[in-house]
Image (tube, coloured by chain):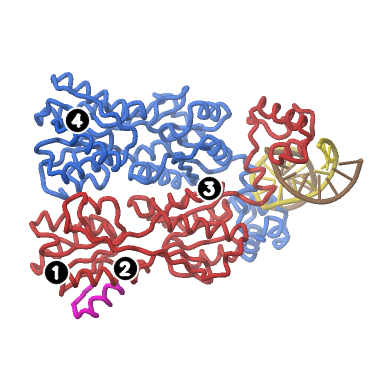
Chain colours: A red, B blue, C brown, D yellow
DNA sequence: CTGAAAGCGCTAACAA
DNA sequence: TTGTTAGCGCTTTCAG
């Protein structure tokens, strides 16, 4: 239904090559010819088909991003940072949420066939598929994931802030600490657990792991109930992320536990709700993770030679202490 | 670099047509031929080019969605609902965030050339461009936006819940109410303002508008300071959305104002943080907005005849009363 | 059941 | 400066 380059060529009395040139080059087309073409194009409401263009140029001018979901603020922020930069670089953005889908790998393969490169968050795609795609020429940047092959990665710093967090807890009087999360589920969590452990043992405090693979408010609430049921609360509960901490916090407070007076509770990410819940946490540069990944990916695609440095970028994080001030502070 | 259909054809000793068929049809290819083709395809790591396929079929198997940004939970949820259904329907999803970009219309035109149809949230795209694209055959579904031409829309119900909210405030003793927001900025806000006004005047309460076009925590905080400066707080402050309300709430509480004892404060959306701030609000079915839009768009694209009914879908919302219980409740 | 050939809409040499 | 002519990788008649 939409008019094609041929319609315009006929209407303007020129060849399709001239139309093609007039639509892009400013040079190499005589002004009056160009005007005639543009007039015809406007008349016919012609918009070049991206498809035809892409096939001819063998480039998509599109990038993909694969993430688990968009329910918390974390991935949404990363995606925003990514989209922002991509738009600036005039590239479309394809998204793929793998949330609970078994056919994620297949979907990623499909996506790879629609873009020049893609960013993979965490373990949403298997190492195997990542390597396969990379071998086949798809440009890939990994975010919040340990290196695969010699692929470029972008990660937030975890260990240092985790240690700082641990020291903060100990300074607050914690002798017995519980870490809620699953180090095996994500390298980020593993590093947090490691950093906390180091800080705790360094200060002679005791720390144990409360295995919890889901990072949701519901899981946090459930964990709170478990801890309450033992009748023996630790001095501090460090959670793998904010949502977990928020769920836990709500349940503890509902049970009349004084937080942070009786038990210190901390999260990770500094999502918006953390401020309202007075939650001590670690701020991650989520947008920057996405933005940085987008730029690195573009370098990869355009062949910019920035790849001479360390292929592994680490972005700084920051301990945010709360609970000593009032709400909303 | 990646192998093409011709490579596979040569390797398998058949024509490209047979490869094409073998890769999709289960029928019309003899099993052993098919096996030979599949073996060759595996051998050469062949993945059909989406581009070639799309051009030949003249379909993209991709849909777009245009939204303002992803910073709050609102749009993120809508996008999730959309992506979910799109994936289920085996279509890729292109995103475009118009946030503060002047060239939004151009970007949308570009996007329209990359997908079979798209969903437009709110006023991210001008009526003019929407109509133009629609006229040219791009399938479009509008979300949270009043009808344009005879296009299909999906909206959340506003007036009814706004009235219910108004009645709740009055029942709580409010005689003087302030509405913070900009009815002119979005039809959603206009309907909320209208519903509240109706309820207020119906109950003999006084209501006035505190013009505020930005729906952010910062704007809410600023508004709180303005109200505090007058030294004459109203009985209730109804905000156009939660973020506004949360910012306002924080500032009021910081100033020692008893909320909701002294002043009732309400938001709209029921974002996650609203629970932790004990904020009375109205829950919107954000995911469903996206999911419904995705389905309607698919009907449009596939030509399903569901278009016989009302082209305007309204999804129910729900008043969520808080502030009478403790935190996290 | 399979192959040959004609596109899909565009860009890019190569000529003129 | 402009036109001609090949493709880009695939699907799809139309024959056989």
- 1 or 3: mark nearer the eye: 3
| Residue B22 pos. (x, y %) | 63, 53
For marks 2 and 4, give the CA distance. Answer: 44 Å
Circles 1 and 3: CB atoms closer than 8 Å: no
In this view of the protein, can residue B228 be seen by the observer? yes
Badge 1 and badge 3 both on one subunit:
yes
Lower sequence index among marks 1 and 2: 2
The magenta stretch spans residue A202: yes
Nearest the eye: A23 or A318: A318
Q: Badge 2: few (under 14), some or many (20 or more) residues near its Cα, within 10 Å?
A: many
Q: Earlier in the sequence, mark 1 or mark 3?
A: 3
Mark 3 neighbour density, 10 Å: few (under 14) some (14–19) many (20 or more) = few
The percent coordinates of residue A34 (x first, y second) are 74, 32
Residue drawn at (24%, 43%), measured in percent from left and top? Answer: B246
Residue that appears at 21% across and 58% down = A322
| Residue B163 to residue A89: above or below | above
Q: Chain of mark 4?
A: B
**From this viewpoint, is residue A214 visible?**
no
Tell me which corner region of the image, top left, top right, bottom left or bottom right, holds residue B175.
top left
The residue indicated by pointer 2 is A161
Mark 4 — residue? B165
Mark 1 lies on residue: A235
In the image shown, does B84 or A48 lie closer to the viewer? A48
Q: Residues within 10 Å of mark 4 (few under 14, many from 20)?
A: many
Chain letter of the residue carrying label 1: A
How far apart, in angstroms, are the residues tagged by discs 4 and 1?
A: 42 Å
Q: Position of residue B10 (x, y in %)?
A: 73, 60
């Amino acid at each position: 239904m939409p008019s094609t380059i041929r319609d315009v060529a006929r209407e303007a009395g020129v060849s399709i090559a001239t139309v093609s040139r007039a639509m892009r080059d400013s040079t190499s087309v005589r002004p009056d010819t160009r005007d005639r073409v543009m007039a015809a194009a406007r008349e016919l409401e012609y918009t070049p088909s991206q498809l035809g263009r892409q096939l001819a140029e063998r480039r998509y001018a599109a990038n993909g991003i694969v993430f688990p979901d968009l329910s918390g603020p974390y991935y949404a922020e990363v995606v925003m940072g990514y989209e922002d930069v991509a738009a600036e670089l005039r590239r479309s953005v394809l998204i793929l949420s793998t949330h609970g889908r078994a056919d994620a790998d297949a979907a990623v393969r499909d996506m790879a066939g629609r873009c020049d490169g893609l960013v993979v968050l965490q373990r949403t795609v298997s190492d195997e598929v990542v390597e396969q795609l990379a071998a086949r020429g798809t440009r890939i940047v990994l975010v919040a994931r340990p290196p695969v092959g010699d692929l470029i990665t972008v990660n937030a710093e975890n260990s240092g802030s985790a240690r700082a967090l641990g020291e903060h807890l100990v300074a607050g009087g914690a002798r017995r600490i519980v870490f809620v999360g699953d180090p095996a589920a994500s390298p980020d969590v593993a590093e947090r657990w490691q950093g906390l452990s180091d800080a705790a043992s360094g200060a002679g405090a005791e720390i144990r792991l409360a295995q919890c693979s889901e990072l949701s408010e519901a899981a946090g609430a459930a964990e709170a109930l478990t801890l309450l049921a033992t009748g023996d609360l630790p001095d501090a509960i460090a959670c793998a992320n904010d949502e977990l901490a928020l769920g836990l916090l709500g349940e503890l407070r509902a049970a009349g536990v004084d937080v942070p007076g009786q038990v210190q509770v901390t999260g990770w990410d500094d999502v918006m709700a953390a401020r309202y819940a007075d939650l001590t946490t670690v701020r991650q540069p989520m947008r920057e993770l996405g933005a940085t990944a987008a730029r690195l990916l573009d370098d990869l695609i355009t062949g910019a030679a920035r790849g001479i440095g360390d292929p592994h970028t680490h972005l700084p994080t920051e301990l945010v202490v709360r609970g000593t001030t009032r709400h909303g502070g």
